[in-house]
Amino acid sequence: MDEARFLAGYDPRRYPAVAVTVDVVALTIRDGKLCVLLVERGAPPFAGQRALPGGFVKEETLDEAALREFAEETGLTPGQGELDRVHLEQLKTYGNPDRDPRMRVISVAYLAFAPRLPEPTAGSDAARAYWVPVDEAKDLAFDHDDVLADGLERARDKLEYTPLATAFTDAEFTISELRHVYAAVWGEELHAGNFHRKVLSVPGFVEATGQTTARGGERGGPRAKLYRAGDARLLHPALLRPTREDRVR
């Protein structure tokens, strides 16, 4: 049987129905805290319960679906440059048979983060949308507690060995601002002097702009130097979390 005849007679109804969704772990830093975007579900299942933003995949790629859902909840406009600084990567696929009470639903989760994301706007299937500190994001719908935990661990790991912390900053930033990103994502306080030395010792991590801040620090003193992301794709040596450094010693 040739392929055309096979496809003409193929009946997908002989197999159980399976749907595909995307869920997005969207992270940003607000008031010095690492926050995740949550929605309040406006319809069953889990009506009124908090969840990660997401939805069913339409006639689009998985990446396009994730970016569409992210843009819908954040109010950013695709195609107008507002999403250019958003880092988006595929996280993991979740497919436990009972993860959705409606039917067999396989979800492809994405991790997204960017600086200064705006107040969210609830999409079509959500009653509300808001930023929540990650340590307050619990008891989520579906298996989203697990998805969030995996997203947080991925983000924390990637800050150790990639320069993606700069995706949480403006295009130009100070070393102190970069340190606050690491502290917020890792949930650990960092020694300012040690961090400054480590960042500048990693080839290609950051590069000086030749400019300084308009004013000195909160306690006065000289104006801080401004940096931008360098061309490195991996950090060598890596910047380990303080708790991991203690285990290595």
Image (cartoon, rainbow, N blue to C red):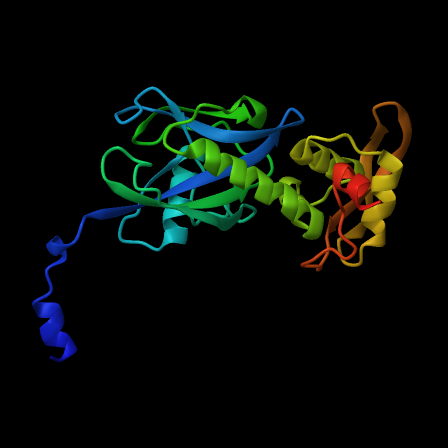
Q: Nearer the viewer, residue 248 or 192?
A: 248
For the point 53% across and 49% down, the residue is 84
Picture coordinates of residue 19, whole percent (x, y): 26, 46
Picture coordinates of residue 91, whole percent (x, y): 49, 48
Query: Looking at this rendering, what residue extends furthest in the top direction?
Result: 48
For the point 83% across and 31% down, the residue is 215
Q: From the viewer's perspective, is 95 left or right of 238?
A: left
Note whether 73 is above or below 80 in the view shown.
above
Q: How many marks?
A: 0
Query: Looking at this rendering, what residue extends furthest in the left direction?
Result: 9
Note whether 85 is above or below 52 in the view shown.
below
Note whether 32 is above or below 176 in the view shown.
above
Picture coordinates of residue 171, whole percent (x, y): 67, 45
For the point 60% across and 38% down, the residue is 115
Q: Quadrant of residue 237?
A: bottom right
Looking at the figure, which quarter contains the C terminus?
Answer: top right
For the point 34% across and 19% down, the residue is 48
Looking at the figure, which quarter contains the N terminus?
Answer: bottom left
Picture coordinates of residue 151, whole percent (x, y): 53, 40
Q: Nearer the viewer, residue 64 or 189?
A: 189
Q: From the viewer's perspective, is 67 left or right of 112?
A: left
Q: From the viewer's perspective, is 50 left or right of 135?
A: left
Q: From the viewer's perspective, is 77 left or right of 240?
A: left
Q: Quadrant of residue 42?
A: top left
Q: Nearer the viewer, residue 239 or 1?
A: 1
